[in-house]
Structure formats: C-alpha cells, structure tokens
Amino acid sequence: MMSREDYEIVIGLEVHSELSTKTKIFCSCSTEFGGEPNSHCCPICMAMPGTLPVLNKKVVEYAIKAGLATNCTIARFSKNDRKNYFYPDLPKAYQISQYDMPLCTKGYVEIETENGPKKIGLTRIHIEEDAGKLNHDEYGRGSLVDLNRAGVPLIEIVSEPDLRSAEEVDSYLKKLKSILEYIEVSDCKMQEGSFRADVNVSVRKKGEEKFGTRTEMKNMNSFRSITRAIEYETSRQIEILEQGGKIEQETLRWDEISGKTFSMRDKEDAQDYRYFPEPDLAIINVSDEMIDSIKKTLPEMPEVRYKKYIEEYKLPEYDSKILTSSKYLSDLFEKATKLCNNPKSVSNWIMTEVTRILNEEEKEPSQIPFTAEQLGKLILLIDKGTVSSKIAKKVLEELFKNPQDPENIIKEKGLTQISDEGAIKEVVQKILEANPQSIADFKAGKNKALAFLVGQAMKETKGKANPQMLNKMFLDELNK
C-alpha cells in the first residue's frame, strides 16, 4: 500500500476580493459593510425588469491596478459576460462576470518556500458582481434574502495549479492579501468576507503528469481553516484512491467543527454556466495612457519596505518580514517612527505587545483601534521617563479599549512614573530594611539579590518607580 509521501498534491485557488469603491459595480448604491438588511439596494441591483447596468469606471481602474501589481498583461479590449445559474440570493438568475476576455492575464506572485523563492502563476484577474446573502433561520424554518451585498464589485484572481502544499497556499494567500492592501484596492477584511478563496484540490502519484480529479471548497475566509481543509481533503482523496475508489468532481463544504468536508453539489464546468456576452454593456477599451497613469499610482511595495527596514532602520530580517507582511502594521510602524524617531522601539512594541493583544482578541491588524500617532507618543513618553515599560503595557491595553491621547490615560489613572530622587530613596531604604537576607546575599556575590530588591521596590510603587534610578540607588546603598 502506498503512503501519502507517494502522492503529489496539486492546488489551484480562485480568490474573490471585494473592491474598496464607494459604490457598487453597476449602480450608485453604497458598498458599506453592514446596515439594515436590504437598505443598500435599488431596482438595478435588485434586478427589477427594465433596469440597465452602468459600469463603474473605478472598478476597472482597481482591477488594472491589481493586475499591474501582480505582473499581469493588461488587455486593451475586454468585455463582460453573463454567467447563468440560479440561486436564491442572485436576483437576476445570472451574474455579470467575464469569461473569455478578462482584464488581466498571465501574471505571477512570488512566494518564499523552504526551497527558496517560487513564482505562482496567475491565469487571470477579472471583474464581476457579488451575489446577495442568505440569512438562515437557526430553527430551520427558512431563509431570508439580504441584497445589500448584491452588486458589490469583486475581482476574481485565478491561480495556475502551481501550489503543492497547504504551507505554500498559506504563503501565497498572505502575499496576495498584502499586495491588495498595499495598493489600496481592497481592505481584505476576511472577517467581513472581503477576501475569500475557493480552493481546488487534487492528488496524483508522484511522477505522473496528468492531473487528478479536483474537488472545490467554496468561500473560505480563514487561513487556519484553509490549511486544515487542504490537509483533510488531501488525506480523504488519497484514502479513496488507495482503496480503489474514484474521486468525484464536486463542490464541497468545509465544516470547521467536525474538521471534515461534505458534498454540496456536482462541480460545474464552463458549459454549465452558458456564458454569453452581456448585451447591456459596451466593450471595455483600455488605453496605454490609462495604464501608464495607473502605474504611477502604485505605492512602495512590501519588498521595497522590507529592504529599507533592514538597511536603514537596522531591524532584524524576521521583524522586517512580519512588519511588511501587513500594510496596516507597516503603516503603523512608519508613522509612529516618524513621530518618535525610535524605529527599534516601535518595532519591538508592535512585534511583542501589539501582536500579543491582537492574537488574544483574535483580531486582524486592520482592526487596531488607535492611531500611529498615539503609539508614537506613548514611546516618546517611555523615552522621556514619564512612564516605565511596565506601565506603558497597561497604557497600551487601555488604547485598545479606549483609544485616546496616552497622556490623558496616564493622568486619569495616575500612572506617571516616579522619578523624584527623594521619593525613590525612601522606597529603597524601606525595602532594604525589610530584606536583610538579600543584602547579605548580594555581598556574598549573589547578583540575583539585586533584581529581587528592585522587583520588591517596583511592587511597592505599583510599577511606577523609575527602574534605572532604582538600580543605581540600590547599588549605591549595597556597595557602601
């Protein structure tokens, strides 16, 4: 019997990313997330008879921008097509998408793997409209349709089947998400469905050239879930093949609780959608001038910032990689550094305390509530000796709960560091009198006794004493 090592995993992804336009792709309704059900829709996105779509120019510009940032060729002529299928939250019973003439083709995204850099090919990037949303009654009495999301503009980024592991998929998705954030065409808020992926998985015996039959897992919006789903689906397919079975081409649903995939329906092929050109929209003509003007708006990309952080700011490679992996973290770092002029300290605070709180609260960097200026000011207050690092951690936790000027938090909660020489000397004398054994230990060469005494003094002052002054005064007294 063959083992998993005898098989090769082949993975291709279709990533759907909502564009950050203010209005929908074919009408002037708001794209804002949330709102009362069916409050962001009009006769056009509700598919009322007699209504006609009008293409949002900004959607085309954002798609081209994404194509340029991912090394794609931009089509000078493109068109929209009708993709026909029935689903309750698709009011027209067809989706306006693109079929044989997409806006962007033949690009790539480079990722880091254990074997070095690897280019993941992009087949295409095309524009399309999103469907609505079904709200299912928890008691199984039916479903309600909310069309607020219907007509929200999407780009679909289709990769080549170049990915060979869950780790490569994770790296690719994070790199792609980072690129879209940097060029500001999508907020990529996975918790709001702004960045989600359809995952196509197949397996074949190593050495074979022909692809195996693929299955597709739809609308996944969590890196962790995608990794788990790929691992499970790979094992499931190998087990079927080892038992002499056949893989069915089908669409699957990933169940997070059970950690298993379940069949939803047969997987459709292109002919099932009966594509034909959208008769109500004109051909999209893209000029060289338009492409050049969009090129000029491309910002400093993650690779450039990564190099700058290492060479100019002297940050470690690991810190630079984490900071530049998210535009939100990178912008936070750059703006805070500009204010306090202490890049190493800003990096340390983001890498440790900010990241820790984000992980504990299961939040994305985009959900950081305070500003870079507030973080920069907090670090200035540490550098000035207004607060100790220990107290600053409490201030930072408060910034997550109630973002405001750090000085206000320090004043309101009485957290100002004690730097008065007389007050600190009084504490030092009190701690020394209460710990004669520690004095004897220090004089006997046990340096840990000093750390203990300083710790006791910090405890006595509730973390407010200036630690540098404490250390110096204890040493002065102990060496008398």
Image (tube, rainbow, N blue to C red):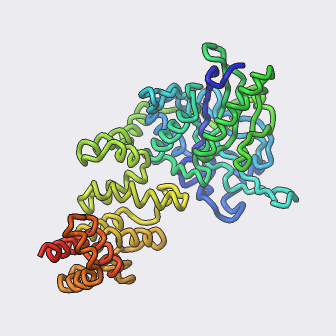
Q: Which quarter of the image is occupied by the C terminus? A: bottom left
Is residue 12 depicted above or below 128 in this figure?
A: above
- Residue located at (74% from left, 47% from top): 258
For residue 475, which quarter of the picture?
bottom left
Q: Position of residue 205 (x, y in %)?
A: 66, 17
Horizontal side of 367 relative to 83 (left or right) equals: left
For residue 447, which quarter of the picture?
bottom left
Q: Position of residue 41 (x, y in %)?
A: 68, 57
Horizontal side of 392 relative to 311 (left or right) equals: right
Q: Position of residue 77 (x, y in %)?
A: 54, 28
Q: Which quarter of the image is occupied by the N terminus? A: top right
For residue 102, which quarter of the picture?
top right
- Residue located at (60% from left, 47% from top): 222
- Residue located at (79% from left, 56% from top): 136
Specify whether residue 384 is in view: no
Is residue 342 depicted above or below 220 in this figure?
A: below
Q: Nearer the viewer, residue 39 or 145?
A: 145
Specify whether residue 79 is in view: yes
Horizontal side of 102 relative to 2 (left or right) equals: left
Q: Position of residue 4 (x, y in %)?
A: 65, 25
Q: Nearer the viewer, residue 271 or 429?
A: 429
Q: Given the current orientation, which residue lies at the most extreme left position? A: 480
Q: Nearer the viewer, residue 300 or 235?
A: 235
Q: Given the current orientation, which residue lies at the most extreme right position? A: 141
Is residue 424 depicted above or below 264 in this figure?
A: below
Horizontal side of 317 relative to 41 (left or right) equals: left
